[in-house]
Amino acid sequence: MKHGSEVRADGDSWLLRIRARDTRRVVGTGVLLGDRLALTCATVLPHPEAQVTVDFPGVRGAAPATGRAHPRHGTPGSGAAGLAVLALDRAPPGAAPAALRRAAPPLGTPVVIRGWAETHDGGPLTIAADVDHTWGEDIRLAPAAHQDLPEHGCHGAPVLDHHDPPRVLGVVLGIRPAAAGAGAGAGAGAGTPFARMIPVDTLLRHLPVAEKWAAGRRGVEPALTSRTSPGSTLLADYAERLARWLTDRGGPPVRTTEVEEGSPRDHTLRRALALADRELVHPRPDALSASPAATVPPIGSLDLAIDVTGRTAEQIAAGIADRMNLTVPGHGSARALLRRARLARTIALLGLNRAAEPADVAELCGELAENGCRLLLVHYGRRTRAERDAGAMIALRQRIARLAADLDALDVRAAQLNEAAQRLAGVVPQDDALTGLHLDYAVIGRMRAAAGPGAAPDGLTAAVDRLDSGIRRAARAVAAGEAEAERRRRRRDALREEFDTYRSLLAFAAATGARGGDGHDGHDGEDLEEQVTAEHDAAFGALWGYFDPGTAGPALTAYVAAVRRLLGLPPADGERKEDRKP
């Protein structure tokens, strides 16, 4: 930096641009942590001893720094996350550290990726994206406009929320560009680009040094694992059941369990919660490696574990909203906010029978279940009859919500099938069956409204069972109709292709004068042309109007025969001379 030049932060002073020292090409993006440390993707360093140039575009007048892998905070490519911490030889005054935010954002949450083009000219790229999927330690982001991301310039790019000022929810460590030939408007699938984000929770698991710059609710409250002792007895069968449930490989979406506080069962439960969290590190990795694999849930299979002892439903909802990075309006209700969000998260609630308002908390659990959450509900001690009934109702509400979603999806498919039936013979609409299912669903709603909150009214479970069976029957019928419609479309398309072939052949013959059928078989050319025109119109109407193979097939055969006679061609395979129309 030249003597006397002004150094001043103009924007996101923590946002760094990383370039190769030899080519000056942009190789990635970094996030300033403070203490002359920068977080980025390990791929920016071609080898552990490599040096890179680090720019501070948000600090006017700042000279570039030199960065190299920090010797004590991970090495490039180490661990599952592929993170790297750079030690910088300088950091300009006014460059503030980034605000890291732990969060488990709901599906569909809008975020922003800030990176750079692969040349170092111009400002940072701002790319809108949505939380698309979560698995293990990672979160997948889908660019909102299905645009490609710079393959190098966005490695290590921060992912920001829409808070003011924005917080860093994670960093981009992998990019899949759109498949060759995929349209810009392609939906989710093989041709859609996406970015792999390492959330702050996972980042802290691999790089604890960053914790001093992190805020936000932890996935598992520290108090829930503080009593877990490495020497405690592990109940292997119980651990396997918990691991299967957390992996979503078995059991209902709402699971209720009973534990005695301080017991081996309690220890086994808390161990499962800790192992499923993205951030927590097991205190004894050697003991964990010796554990049966079936007792270890996947990292990231739990989004939140919260002790609800002494808490009201609104306080619990506020904690959940905080973990999801949802901002509750000034005097608004966290519960109302959660009802509007597309949660679909996995949440463990411990101590339901010790909540300040157990009945109201049970109602909140029902709302979460209806909103797609998988719930692990923990009671300390034996449940009362009322608590068992309340738990059964929570599970039933989840099931009813799922059936409602299934019915909505069937409505869409049935509407498409009905449209196909208007165009294709032999395709049977399923409107009547779905109308009956909607009536059954309305009956369930009236039964719930009449009974009020709490236990399920008499007959509700049986009514849900009937609706479930009816939806499965209707789904099979719709699937059969879709398969039949697809077969008819393929048949129609094959006939259309043959029709177009002969129409093109006739046009070519007319353009070149290559017609040898005038007067052939005792017919004059004018009569043959009139017959071709008539057969053309009949076949076209049968193939592009309401399609009935029994009508369209013979109509096409007649058109093909007429064209071949006009052109002086021998009959098509399978056509006998006596079958021709006079």
Image (tube, grey):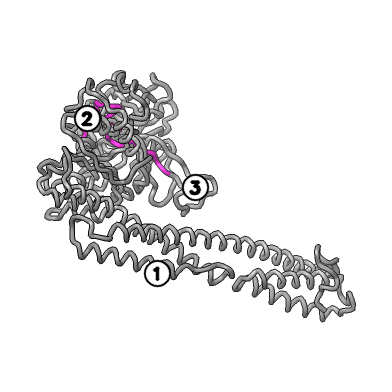
Expressed as whole percent of the image width and height from the top left, the position of residue 452 reads 18, 61
* Residue 200 falls inside the magenta stretch: yes
Q: CA distance from mark 2 to mark 3?
A: 37 Å
- Direction from residue 185 to residue 281 in the image, left or right: left
Expressed as whole percent of the image width and height from the top left, the position of residue 164 reads 21, 47
Which residue in the protein does label 1 denote?
435
Which residue in the protein does label 3 denote?
191
**Magenta segment, principal secondary structure?**
helix
- Direction from residue 375 to residue 580 in the image, left or right: right
Q: Earlier in the sequence, mark 2 or mark 3?
A: 3
Amino acid, disc 3: Gly
Q: CA distance from mark 1 to mark 3?
A: 37 Å
Q: Is residue 11 visible?
A: no
Amino acid, disc 1: Thr
Q: Earlier in the sequence, mark 1 or mark 3?
A: 3
Packing grade of label 2 (10 A; few <14, some 14-19, many >=20) is some
* Residue 459 falls inside the magenta stretch: no
Which residue in the protein does label 2 denote?
211
Q: Residue at x 51, y 45 (%)?
A: 179
Q: Is residue 432 visible?
A: yes
Range of residues picked out in magenta: 194-214
Q: Residue at x 29, y 38 (%)?
A: 302
